[in-house]
Image: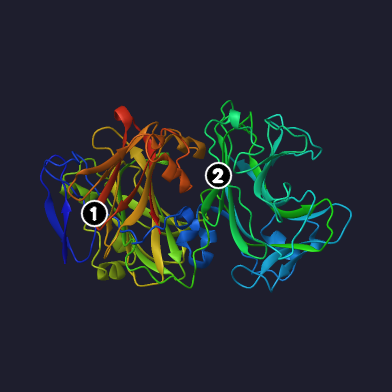
Amino acid sequence: MKQLHFALPNRCSRRLSYTRPLVRFAGRCKGSLSRWAAVTLLIPSATLAATTANIGIAARYPGDKGIASDPAVILADNFESYTDVSQLTRIWSKTFWPRYMRIATTNAYAGTKSIEMTLPVSTREVGQSINKLFSPGFDTLYCRAYMRWDPGYNVNTSNHNGIYMGGGNNPQNGQKPNGSNFFVLLVQNNDLKNEGPPGWLHEYAYTPDQQQQWGDHWYPNGMGFPVAKHPDFRPLPNFLPVRGRWYCYEQMVRLNTPGKRDGEVKVWVNGNLTADWPDLEIRTVNTLKIDQVYLGLHALHSERVNKKWYDNVDIAKQYIGPMRSASAITAPATQFQNFSSRLHIETGDKVGIEGFVIAGSEPKKLLIRGLGPTLAQAGITEVMQNPTLELHDDTGSLVAMNHGWKNTQQAAIAATGLAPPNDSESAIIATLDPGSYTIVQADAGGGTGEGLLEIYDLDPDTDSSLVNMSTRGLVRPGNGALIAGWSIEIGSGSNNVLIRAIGPSLSQAGINAPLTDPVLTLYDSNGNVITTNDNWKDSQQAVIENTGLGPPDDREAAIYTALGSGIYTAIVTGKSGNTGVALLEVYSTQ
């Protein structure tokens, strides 16, 4: 039996006992946590490789299994479900020239199938593609695709291929965009400088800065890129892939704020940053979005039969990274076993919300609790008196709900030894498939007050783990901070964690009163400050950007750190005592 501390605001802590790790309000009478209490989470142990390859979405889904369920993933296709290209529109919006495409069964990166595109011997223009359309579009988007050129691939003319991201209506007549009508950004390989097939990686771009009629060609080393207009540009070596091998290409496009040159295009190959073109002006109006992604193969003519294959394609709102090997993965020795967050809960946009993701190959049994009255025993004032719980899946469908834990599942909940102390508090036991889920806590009578949301892993030995937690709630001055905590238990080494405090960008999701300037502070188990951050670009900008998880607004906060075994707490407050809704996120990077 472990004893857990509940720190009373402005007074010494008392001890409560539970049969397994519960929630820990960590604090000290004279510690740095001041008036706030902390809650505890458990994160999987892991070691981060010296590359961004292991900190993307794919790192959480061995073999990409279950990756489509991640809340940041928009499309995932490994082509295993098809027998004919006519079936591609189950996932893709449309196909062009499918006569030159087929579902290949003898050439795949993972699994047994891929999409094969062919340039026949021809003196005329030929091309094919698979397209995904979006409405509305996106301001930032990532696309990852594995690709391979056949061993003899050789096209000595215009040869568009790779990952295309575009917006608006491209007239395809060599017209220069005006910032409001369209743009084209295509990472491709084309032997234009006699470097040898399939050619150096470069960006084929139609933007308002366009210098050539039929699009510009930007190379990683700066060739073809108007460097003088882009003071933050840093050259990287040009990259020439080897034909006959698979490569993991990923492109990120971030559109600029109209009136500013803050757009950017990045390309990673096998998880390594290979090209970065910053300070871009891609649009002049907010209505122009990334509304199309396609993979294709095109040439003005072809002297031989040339083939290119694509496999394991993902489109997402965050950095994806290379596929994590399924064969090399076993269930982690340690993992998130508790997620907990304390927050002030009201109504409407200000109810308590906690999200989490289950990664792996097997279902996971969880206990979810929503506490209120019990917090008064720890000296918390204005507690929620009548908490209710709802559990939703990634489609928004209701999975389970509870009001008063003894009303449903009483015997099963009591058997865990984690029954809520007060009968008016709520709890749910659920066995959930890998995917993303959301918990909502509110008051049955429409009341307000402090609440505690908790998630417990009742079956930690399955080949699945809890990864990533987020909690959204109202931040107020004084004791009204948004709090999350976690416990890491590692035999040796450390666990890399990215923590974000999101505020201003919540307005894009329809939140009416977001926290305008969040401040994020990380504490150890003794209440000592490890680090703090106000604006995420003020420190660690490069390492955070390389995760693909840089906050959307410069006023938002983020901390990236390696943590050893112990208990940690993250607290979000408003700068100068500001009030508003904030989102606190914790990412375990494996």
The amino acid at mark 1 is Ile
Q: Residues within 10 Å of mark 2 (few under 14, many from 20)?
A: some
Q: Earlier in the sequence, mark 2 or mark 1?
A: 2
Left/right placement of residue 566 relative to residue 14 reads right
What residue lies at 51% left-to-right and 64% top-to-bottom? Answer: 66
What residue lies at 26% left-to-right and 62% top-to-bottom? Answer: 489
What residue lies at 25% left-to-right and 64% top-to-bottom? Answer: 418
User: Residue 265 at x, y = what percent?
Assistant: 58, 42
How far is the residue under mark 2 from the one under mark 1? 40 Å
Q: Residues within 10 Å of mark 1 (few under 14, many from 20)?
A: many
The residue labelled by disc 2 is 236
Q: Quadrant of the N terminus?
A: bottom left
User: Residue 442 at x, y = what percent?
Assistant: 36, 47
Considering depth in this image, is 276 or 60 the residue closer to the camera? 276
Left/right placement of residue 315 relative to residue 389 reads right
The amino acid at mark 2 is Leu
As drawn, the residue found furthest toward the right would be: 123
In this picture the colour scheme is rainbow
Q: Quadrant of the C terminus?
A: bottom left
Considering depth in this image, is 424 or 319 the residue closer to the camera? 319
Q: Is residue 558 visible?
A: yes
Q: Is residue 353 visible?
A: no
User: Residue 110 at x, y = what percent?
Assistant: 59, 69
What secondary structure is found at the residue carrying circle 2? loop
The residue labelled by disc 1 is 567
Q: Nearer the viewer, mark 2 or mark 1?
A: 2
